[in-house]
Image (spheres, rainbow, N blue to C red):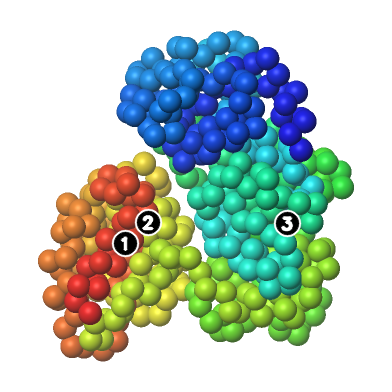
Amino acid sequence: MLRILANLIQNKRIVLLGFGLEGQSSFRFFTKYFPKNRILVADRNPQIANHPLLQNKLVEMSSGEAYLGSILEDDFIVKSPGIKLPSDCRIETGSIYSQTDLFIQNFRKQIIGITGTKGKSTTSSLLFKILQDQGKEVVLLGNIGKPAFDYWDKITDHTFVVFELSAHQLEYTKFSPAYAILLNLFPEHLDYFRTENHYFDAKFNIAKFQLAKDRFYFGDLEHTNFLSSNLKSKLKPSVYELINDTIVKQHSATPLLQLNELLYLKGLHQLKNCLPLLSLSRDLNLDEEQVLNSIKTFVPLPHRIEFAGKIKQTSFYNDSISTIPEASIEALKALQNVRYLILGGLDRTLDYQKLYSFLLSFPLKKVFFIGPAGKRMFAEMNLTYSFEKILLDSLHDFEAQLPYLIQDREPEICLLSPAAASYDEFRNFEARGDYFKSLIHKLL
């Protein structure tokens, strides 16, 4: 399976653009399989020179503000996701490759790619469990934190590859997986992508390069009319549909899966994301009853409407993954009796009007606003709301509010569902969620 790649890099210097988790994975891969090729590691951070992987290696390095200046026209560039090229960059985007692109090119027939603004990690993990429960040979990789190149030598002809794909990973890809799932689309990552359409275009790459015989499954999307005109494969509408809180087969009133049958997943949005998985499972000839049982018993990932603990009558939930208003709205719908809500974080100029309108009729007692995004929300919510608005500098200041929330009273819920990114205060949403949970665990 290395022949295609060997032809691409023949007599070329390999440039690893970015040396984070995926860049380091690429370095290990190329030094293992192509030890004769020269390698240039290009990263803005000058500390890469001290990385253990690069010690005692004959490797070139370029860092600092001019780290792109050492890249030549005939170099083979492997870009890490999230590395934003400047607008005046002289590198031709058509010459940029990525782990995602190269991996899909080699294993596309075995790959089930999953993307969407929200829900892709949970849905990918659920599909991994479904296939495992059916006795299939399967790996889960990609945006979930597992670089594709780390699994290259683990793929056999019988392996199913569940590939979680972010917009950053899909941005420069020129190949699409044989099975593609697009769950939903909302404006996101506009601090990286130039426009909303640029972000959507990156997401659409999951199906743009499919062949006529490939399968594309989609959720409840208003954007598929635009996409369908650019597809070689056919859109694969679900043979299942969601009616109220129940999944049924089309033209059948017999309940197949109801929301209250999900033991651990919370929210109608989770049930909706099961629709393309059921259609895919049908096309793969999986046992439907066993698929349904896998869904019912699936334990979701942390930081996704995660129960963090109960103190007296107040239950605390960590939904730090919610970095857009639509996700926070779904979290509020999913939980009963939310009375205290924590909003805010890094301000990426998202439009919060839908959230403001939703909160007008939601019976909250207090909303805590944190960080720059919270400060803007606090100022913009100038209508009359039934709840008290409390402005805090950061999530760290929330600890002082806890004594009020755990007084003896009727059962209530406090929810962290920020509708904003975490980078103003934390390195990622996981660190933010872990900190929130640590505050609760101190009092348990």
The residue that mark 3 highlights is 160
Q: Earlier in the sequence, mark 1 or mark 3?
A: 3
At 51% across and 14% down in the image, what residue appears? Answer: 71
Mark 2 is surrounded, within 10 Å at the Cα level, by few (under 14), some (14 to 19) or many (20 or more) other residues, namely some
Helix, strand, or loop for circle 3?
strand
Helix, strand, or loop for circle 1?
helix
71 versus 98 height, above or below? above
Q: Is residue 104 left or right of residue 150?
A: right
Q: Nearer the viewer, residue 377 or 183?
A: 183
At 76% across and 62% down in the image, what residue appears? Answer: 280
Answer with the quarter of the image where residue 434 lies: bottom left
Q: Are marks 1 and 2 in contact (CB under 8 Å)?
A: yes
410 versus 149 height, above or below? below
At 57% across and 39% down in the image, what residue appears? Answer: 169
Residue 134 seen in the figure: yes
Q: Amino acid at mark 3?
A: Phe
Q: Position of residue 308 (x, y in %)?
A: 33, 73
Q: Amino acid at mark 2?
A: Glu
Answer with the quarter of the image where residue 92 lies: top right
Q: Is residue 408 left or right of residue 413?
A: left
The residue that mark 2 highlights is 430
Q: Is residue 317 left or right of residue 148?
A: left
Helix, strand, or loop for circle 2?
helix
How far is disc 1 from disc 3 in space, using C-alphas? 32 Å
347 versus 94 height, above or below? below
The label number, if any, that marks residue 434 in the structure image: 1
Q: Nearer the viewer, residue 214 or 156?
A: 156
Residue most toward the right? 213
